[in-house]
Amino acid sequence: MVDETNNATLQLDEVSILGNILFDDSGETMLTTTQHLVPEDFSDYRNREIYRACMSVQQKGRTVDLASITEELKNNKLFDSIGGEAYLDSIMDNTVRIAPVENYITSVREKSLLNNFLNKIDNILSDAKTKPIKDISEFIGKSADEILEISQRRNVAQAKSLDQVSENVVAKLVKQTEEFKKNGIKANGVTGVPTGYAEADKFTKGWHKGDMIVIGARPSVGKTAFALNLLYQVAKKQKPVIFFSLEMSAESIAMRLLNLVSGLSSDEINSLEYMPGSTKQHVLIDTHDNRAIASKAQKLQRGFDELVSLPFYIDDNPGSKMMDIATKCKKLQNQIREIKKQDIGLIAIDYLGLITSPGHGGSESRQQEVSDISRQIKQMARQLEVPVIALTQLSRDSEKRPDHTPQISDIRDSGAIEQDADMIFMLYRPDYYTKQQGMGKDKENQEGNNQQEEEENSPISKVEVILIKNRNGSTGKIPFIFDKEHCSFNVSDLDRAEEGF
């Protein structure tokens, strides 16, 4: 049973390497793989011949993809023997792309070395038992040399000199400038996708490929609304974004976005009278010849017009696993690249605590489960080369402290999130805690209670967005105004002036 499991894992690793090669139009995965693997490292005959065909196509200076490999295998009369189109399709369908391809390369290489080592030991033992040994010293020496040759093939990473690293840095900077010019971006220090908020860009320098960004807050503080605003800022520049909503329906998310882009509250939208025959392109509303209602109808139509023009994708499947999320992201990324010749600009998951993982149970295993999920999110960000925002709920600890400002230790379930994240934002909304403290006050403070109640019921809240961890930059606070009725986050000019921003 163990052997069957090991063989299945090895087969999956080999398939994932081949699939990564065929999916990667840039050819970088093929270059990486050929530095570490030869065809003989693949245990499955089919995988071995497909990889050999990949190497042949590469040596001919052609792009290694499904079409070129199919042609190469047919020319070498190997297409049918490897399973034909059905097997090639199964490689594309079963490729696992959450982890970096180097992980699969290491796994296949190490298992190949182990098999070669064990086979060599078996051959030496067989020769020692069945063949005459004229010179024992020579036999032992030859056997030792053969074992040493295998052991020297171990994949031991070498330290890189600054001379080598500096060359890579220069190449990266040149490529960055070329991308800026291609996309009409001014070189102003913002090296990632602009957040849409100048104050946030000062700290983050934009959202960067492969980064994991965590946004933490207590329930109902506004983390979902904040994430939607961040996605909207990217989407309105026509860069595709994906929002995974594990708690709310796609329609509820779309309604929040409609509040944001139309400037109308949910109450205002729901109070209008909609007529049969309405479509997203032409919403029919009975205005009763009322100018105020007609104005709202115009705002609503403009809102729908903007919504349908945004490259904004919503997945509202509850109980999603990280494998499901990663697979959906990859498929959508491939579609977007093929149709729009673009990459995904930003991904957000709402929220981390609702992602499920099989095989865990109990409070202790939940911590391990969240640790695994956190690492998978980081791996997905790196593999897809897309910034990923993960929302997370904070524990009640902040409510117990005199100073309710959130801390990293308030993140639920796992310290691994703190380790894996490149940036961690905390949302602090003073009126949230005012409401908690205002309950049960005596009548002597009635005037103060009335003021508290007014703050609690206000559609506008002050929110401090605290960048508490930034792996590649400084940390700090950004004052925002949260317009709850319109699901809108805007930088507070007044607070920024008062606090020296």
Image (cartoon, rainbow, N blue to C red):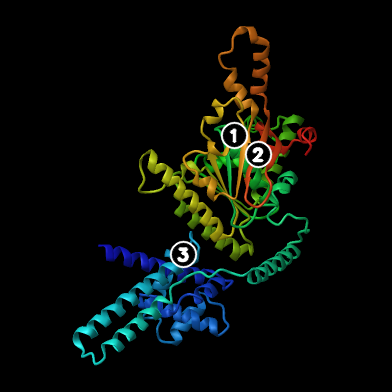
> Which image quarter: residue 487?
top right
The residue type indicated by label 2 comes to Ile
Q: Which mark is residue 20?
A: none
Q: Earlier in the sequence, mark 1 or mark 2?
A: 1
Q: Which mark is residue 466?
A: 2
- What residue does disc 1 label? 406
* Labels 1 and 2 touching (C-beta < 8 A): yes
Q: CA distance from mark 3 to mark 2?
A: 35 Å
In the picture, measured across the screen, residue 157 lies left or right of residue 125, that is right
Q: Residue furthest left?
A: 130
Front residue of 262/415: it is 415
Q: CA distance from mark 3 to mark 1?
A: 36 Å
At horizontal 73% and vertical 48% (from top left) the residue drawn is: 202
At horizontal 30% and vertical 84% (from top left) the residue drawn is: 140
The residue type indicated by label 3 comes to Asn
Which SS class for mark 1?
A: loop
In the picture, measured across the screen, residue 117 lies left or right of residue 155, that is left
Circle 1 Cα neighbour tier, 10 Å, few/some/many (<14 / 14–19 / ≥20) = many
> Can you say whether 296 is above or below 365 in the image?
above
In the picture, measured across the screen, residue 373 lies left or right of residue 125, that is right
Front residue of 343/31: it is 31
Q: Residue furthest front?
A: 137
x, y percentage for residue 206?
69, 52
Q: Is residue 277 visible?
A: no
Circle 2 Cα neighbour tier, 10 Å, few/some/many (<14 / 14–19 / ≥20) = many
Front residue of 420/152: it is 152
Is the N terminus in the top left, top right, bottom left or bottom right quadrant?
bottom left
In the picture, measured across the screen, residue 300 lies left or right of residue 7, that is right
> Which image quarter: residue 332?
bottom right
- What residue does disc 3 label? 103
